[in-house]
Amino acid sequence: MSIYLPPNARALVKALSLGGDVKPLSKGEIGARSRGDGYQPNSPETRRVWQYWAHRAGCGDMLSKRPEG
């Protein structure tokens, strides 16, 4: 989520500058994301992505060495 926060914020600011209303996610859309249809913070995929970005940022050595699974 921290990777996408800045570009999403820029998109929101641009949308707001165009005028009109910005429609937030509905409760159903938020619920679908929470049920596992979207981001899963403890999944192996999320850990792999986090490791990738940490290494790209030059701080991969700071990650704890935690066994998979």
Image (cartoon, grey):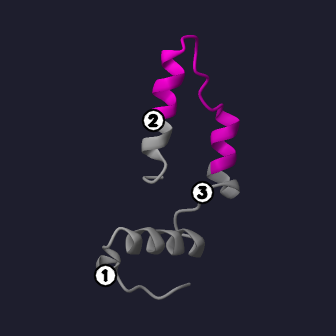
Q: Main secondary structure of the magenta part?
A: helix
Q: Is residue 55 left or right of residue 15?
A: left
Q: Residue at x 54, y 68 (%)?
A: 46
58 vs 28, nearest the viewer? 58
Q: Report how far apart the C-alphas of labels 1 and 2 lie in the structure.
A: 29 Å
CA gap, disc 3 and disc 1 = 25 Å
Q: Which residues are magenta?
A: 10-33
Secondary structure at numbered mark 3: loop
Which residue does the image show at 50% across and 39% down from the upper left? 8
**Nearer to me, 2 or 64:** 2
Mark 1 crowdedness (10 Å alpha carbons): few <14, some 14-19, many ≥20: few
Give the camera-side residue of 51 and 43: 51
Q: Say which amino acid is labelled 1.
A: Asp
Q: Amino acid at mark 2?
A: Ala
- Label 1 residue SS: helix
Task: State which tag comes first along the sequence, 3 or 2.
Answer: 2
Q: Is residue 18 magenta?
A: yes
Q: Report the residue marked by disc 1.
A: 61
Q: Identify the residue under disc 2.
A: 9
Quadrant location of residue 24?
Answer: top right
Is there a contact, CB below 8 Å, between mark 3 and mark 1? no
Q: Which residue is mark 3?
A: 39
Q: Residue 68 location in percent, x, y?
A: 52, 85
**Which image quadrant is residue 69 in?**
bottom right
Please report whichever mark, 1 or 2, sits nearer to the chain's N-terminal start.
2
Alpha carbon distance from label 3 to label 2: 19 Å
Residue 23, x across and y down, in percent: 61, 23
Give the mark toward the camera: 3 or 2.
Answer: 2
